[in-house]
Amino acid sequence: MNRKLFILSIIFLYYAIIFLSGDKAFAISGDEIRITTALRSELPNAESVTITIQKAKSGDLAAQNNLGDMFLTGSGFPVDCNQAFYWFHVAAEKGLPAAQFNLGNMYLNGRGAAQNVNEAKQWYEKAAQQEFPAAINQLGVIADNDQEANTWYLKAAAMGFAPAQNNLGVAYARGKGVIADQKTAADWYALAAAQGSASAENNLGLMYVMGRGIAQNYTLAFEWFMKSAEQGFTSAQSNLALMYRDGRGVGQDIVTAAMWLEIAANKNFDVATKAFVELKNKMTNDQIAMVDQRVADWLQSHYPTMNLQNKEN
């Protein structure tokens, strides 16, 4: 494929889906990242479920928050959103910001309680008053307008919170509440990517492919797509496949391209599914068998239980 067609294929992905992608304990809400998994207070990793329960019942706020997380995620217990809500509420009422944030998420997503955005906002505000960056970012997600959202994002980004930095990158890339500025967008993406934000890594890779706000560099684009793809970020997996398919920033390798496309397609990513079918029709049976084995090996190493959860959600 010539250079022009390659860039057009990237542009399609860029504008259709990818540019606004979100982080990983994080998900897309409109154009912004919403954190959907609970945030734990720090506790020793080896602490047993029994000890956590004992400490929670004795009034330890961090243990109460962690117990809520365990019920929410099914860690040590069957998933029980009502119990998760209860324990988050107990710790939140006593002022633990992580629990206040988690309780806000429960209200926002209607888990363990009826969905109530106003109630969620009140709990985010309580956590934000204690300078809890995830809550500050979330206030941007649910803000009434782009200008207000960017005010919250900037505050959290200044605290080094990668999802907020990525959200600001989106704002400047799209001109949401600010004058569009691709260089500033790239700068924010770079800050978040340096912290390992999968969506920012993908977005920065796109900036390098497009030469937007930064000098075009396929090699660096490939490297950032790879970092994001290895974290399970579906859009990056599809973008990485295009780089392998067309030999941009890396030697052309249709087997590896098909591998990444199939991994993304397994998570119902329509763009990757279409590209995978088209590429597979051009491959030999031996190549297809090689792809299937490499996909199985990758999935087993990254998802031992074969849970193909999309890290964008």
Image: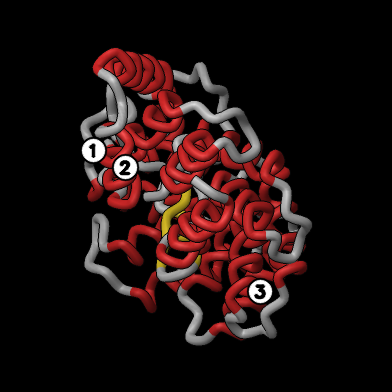
Q: Residue at x 27, y 36 (%)?
A: 266
Q: Viewer-proximal residue, 31 or 261?
A: 261
Image coords of residue 289 (percent x, y): 28, 15
Which residue is disc 1 drawn over? 79
Image coords of residue 197 (percent x, y): 60, 46
Q: Separation of disc 1 and disc 2 at Cα?
A: 5 Å
Q: Amino acid at mark 2?
A: Leu
- N-term mark: 1 or 3: 1
Element type where label 3 sits in the image: helix
Q: Residue at x 72, y 76 (%)?
A: 181
Q: Residue at x 34, y 58 (%)?
A: 106
**Closer to the camera: disc 1 or disc 3?**
3
Image coords of residue 111 (percent x, y): 26, 56
Task: Estimate how packed mark 2 is, as few (under 14), some (14 to 19) or many (20 or more) residues with alpha carbons within 10 Å.
Answer: many
Q: Is residue 302 above or below residue 69?
A: above
Q: Separation of disc 3 and disc 2 at Cα?
A: 35 Å
Element type where label 1 sits in the image: loop
Q: Separation of disc 1 and disc 3 at Cα?
A: 39 Å
Q: Is residue 131 above or below residue 266?
A: below
Image coords of residue 110 (percent x, y): 26, 63
Which residue is disc 3 drawn over? 172
Q: Contact (CB < 8 A) between labels 1 and 3?
A: no
Q: Is residue 54 above or below residue 279?
A: above
Q: Amino acid at mark 3?
A: Tyr
Which residue is disc 2 drawn over? 72
- N-term mark: 1 or 2: 2
| Count of marks placed on residues | 3
Element type where label 2 sits in the image: helix
Left/right placement of residue 285 relative to residue 132 reads left
Q: Is residue 295 above or below residue 80?
A: above
Q: Amino acid at mark 1?
A: Val
